[in-house]
Amino acid sequence: MPKTLFSVRSGLLALAALLPAMPAFAQDESLPMPPVFLNAMEPMVEREAATDKVVVTRHKGTFGGKTVAYDAIVTETPVTNAKGAKAAVVVTYAYLGRTKGDTKRPVLFIFNGGPGASSSPLHMNAFGPRRIVGKGEAAHLENNPNSLLDVADLVFIDPPGTGASMPVKGADASSLFSVTGDAAAVADVVQRWRQANHRTDAPFALVGESYGTARALAMLGAEDSAKLPLPDGVALFSLSIGDSDGPVISDVALLPTLAAVAWYHEAADRKGQTVAQRFAEARAFAEIDYAQALIAGASLPAVDRARIAARLSELVGLPAAQLEKDGLQLDRQAFMLGLLSAKGLRTGQLDGRATRAISESNMHPPFDDPSMTLGAETGHLIEDYIGKDLGYPLPSPYRSLNLGINFKWEWGRGEVYRTVRFTPFLTKAMADKPGMKLLTVGGYYDITTPIAAGQFALDHAGIGPDRRTSKSYAAGHSIFEDDAEMARFAGDVRQWAATLAK
């Protein structure tokens, strides 16, 4: 396996399920899979033994305008398979403010998605004390003023099969690459870390992005089953938690996002609106007139069908005749390929602002997304940082992404990502612990996990706006990749994290 890996958008969630193949005319099926994806398909480098090493180093930095002395703790935690045998070692990277006698600072346990993505995007690009800045050969590490260390301690978790968290040689780790196995293992790591570091009296929260939002909710179910303590808070970035993929609702939830993307590219008349205003206008139309038209289906009078198609066209920038022909239903691929087709461009899916010439869109599906950050060559920065700054000798090259486990992920009998329901775990947990604080975050330009889809899933589960804090940003799937929004994003999460101790 090549030692130089890459950083990718944390939005590589269930790629086979959520980034469906583009039409054949947009791609050359004879071309091989891009090298970066071939690297991500390489076999895992197994560990020789189920070790439990702990490495501590001391540091100082300025975060949120405050100077903080902190300890960095890298911990190896062996986890067991379905038969109770030690099958993998999970590695965590913790940062603890060194405030004398303060053992009740909130602790945030943070992970990304995939499944198969390491914690490196949120660790090294968003909230860790050091951040990767720049691209390609110009990429380097800088102190991260947006880190949350001024208000909370941070524990970044590489789930089994990612980062340095590899299977143990001779053990069967396959049960860990499933919704239930992964959730149980990571939940176990969280509680064992709290006990080992004498933080069982401190408030704690689960923070997940993309598939990490599904993992966080599945962990609530695992904690309930194992009679483990429930967290004081849950933060969900770019929600992918199910319950929004059925007829009608999938189109209703997608429309506001497509309207925001069309607004950005000026493929629809902005009429002096901000993107937030356009999003809100499109959502109001989607949830009333558009929803009623979709429910009516073939019984909708022709004059009303034409009226709805015309209004849709004004919002999403596609021809009304095409929308009417498609039964008023929206299609991600048709939108991404059609919105800017007159210019020969297609849009991104993880971030609808990104574009690429359709003629150059020749990757194998489902990887043909111009907003997917590939080949950034930051793997050596992550490895150098962990090895030199944190003093932890990596047993194998750091695995930012593992598509091998992504493609073979076990969703449950007869289930796929789109059909698994995660909200029941949250509903029960919030009933058992009414004071649990919930934060949801989304980007207006994220076509992969539209803001309205996650919010609908929560509303439908009985968790309305009065029971959560919801934030939206003029960004794509990974809010932290948008420099213009990162400071506000960090400020909102910092403010929410500070409430955990109240």
Image (spheres, rainbow, N blue to C red):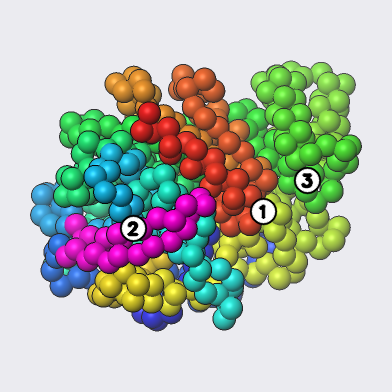
- Residue type pointed to by label 3: Ala
Of residues 232 and 166, the one nearer the viewer is: 232
Magenta stretch containing residue 61, yes or no?
Answer: yes
The region drawn magenta spans 53-77
Comparing marks 3 and 2, which lies closer to the viewer?
2
Element type at marker 1? helix
Q: CA distance from mark 1 to mark 2?
A: 28 Å
Q: What residue is shown at x 59% (from left), y 50% (from top)? A: 487
Q: Specify few, some or many for label 3: CA neighbours under 10 Å numbering under 14, 14-19, or 20 or more.
A: many
Residue 262 is tagged as 3
Q: Whole-percent x and y of residue 404?
A: 37, 63
The foreground one among 337 and 80 is 80
Q: In terms of image quadrants, where is residue 292?
A: top right
Mark 2 lies on a secondary structure that is strand
Q: Position of residue 383 (x, y in %)?
A: 37, 74
Q: Quadrant of residue 337?
A: bottom right
* Quadrant in the picture for the C terminus: top left
Main secondary structure found in the magenta portion: strand
Q: Is residue 348 left or right of residue 314?
A: left
Tag in front: 1 or 2:
2
Looking at the rendered structure, the kind of residue marked 1 is: Ala
Horizontal placement of 398 versus 277: left or right? Answer: left
Relative to 193, 276 lies left or right: right
Q: Answer whether labels 1 and 2 touch (C-beta < 8 Å).
A: no
The residue under label 1 is 484
